Amino acid sequence: MGREFLEIFEDWAENYDNTVNGHDREYKEVFQQYDQILDEVVENSIGTVLEFGVGTGNLTKKLVEDGHTVIGIEPSPAMRDIAKMKLPDVTVLDGDFLDFPKPTTPIDTIVSTFAFHHLNDEEKELAIKNFATLLPKGGKIVFADTLFVSDTSKQRKIREAEEVGYSNLAEDLRREYYPNIDTIEQIFTEQQFNVSFKQMNDFAWLIIATFK
């Protein structure tokens, strides 16, 4: 996760669960079917899981309940505190997509939800390259995040947000590094992953990549 956005998450931590559960009208469409999105990530995960951007531990909880051992990485102290209160037996370490304590046990799946867009395209490529060194053949990366089919579709969503007065959402879409699908596909393909995409709502897509 891009550390330049850390202050946003420190401020957001207390209300994060309300937002993702649909109580913030500006972000309701972004997180529509949030529980189903998390369930899809869990369903496509195998073995021991390394999770980036744990946040308040919502995905982590579901992974643990499904029988996975989870090692969590989260840069926000406020978010980590909430996750640790929910899941005292789960390891949640300080770190981000590019700078994190290397696991001492083999990892089968790397997961993240609504966080990968905090990296610019060059950083995304570096992260996936590093992740490939942690996974065995057949290991998986399962992400859910906001993606766009094209720059035009992204600009349309920004205009729509502005037209209904969702200034925070419009600024968010401008400020952070929401990628196009073809960019993500190229990054994974170049790092020897087979990758597929599934649209979950008007913003969020499920990314499933298997290391060749």
Image: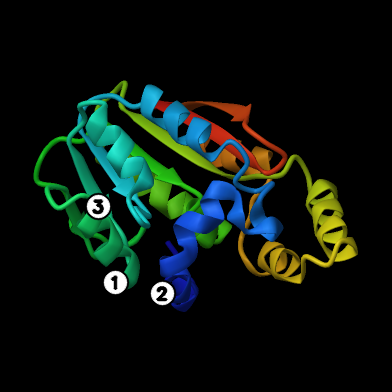
**Mark 3 vs mark 2, CA separation in Å:** 17 Å
- Labels 3 and 2 touching (C-beta < 8 A): no
The numbered dot on residue 86 is 3
Q: Earlier in the sequence, mark 1 or mark 3?
A: 1
Q: Amino acid at mark 1?
A: Pro
Q: Is residue 18 above or below residue 142?
A: below
Q: Amino acid at mark 2?
A: Glu
Quadrant in which the N terminus is drawn: bottom left
Which residue lies under the disc numbered 1? 77
Q: Is residue 92 above or below residue 198?
A: below
Q: Is residue 71 left or right of residue 53?
A: left
Determine if residue 25 is in view: yes
Please state the horizontal and vertical placement of residue 15, each as a whole percent of the image: 47, 65
Determine if residue 95 is in view: no
Q: For numbered disc 3, what is the local secondary structure?
A: helix
Q: Earlier in the sequence, mark 3 or mark 2?
A: 2
Please state the horizontal and vertical placement of residue 177, each as a whole percent of the image: 61, 60
Q: Is residue 27 left or right of residue 130?
A: right
Please state the horizontal and vertical placement of residue 128, each as a whole percent of the image: 41, 45
Q: Nearer the viewer, mark 1 or mark 3?
A: 3
Q: Nearer the viewer, mark 3 or mark 2?
A: 3
Q: Residue at x 86, y 52 (%)?
A: 156
Looking at the image, which is closer to me, 136 or 192? 136
**Mark 2 vs mark 1, CA separation in Å:** 7 Å
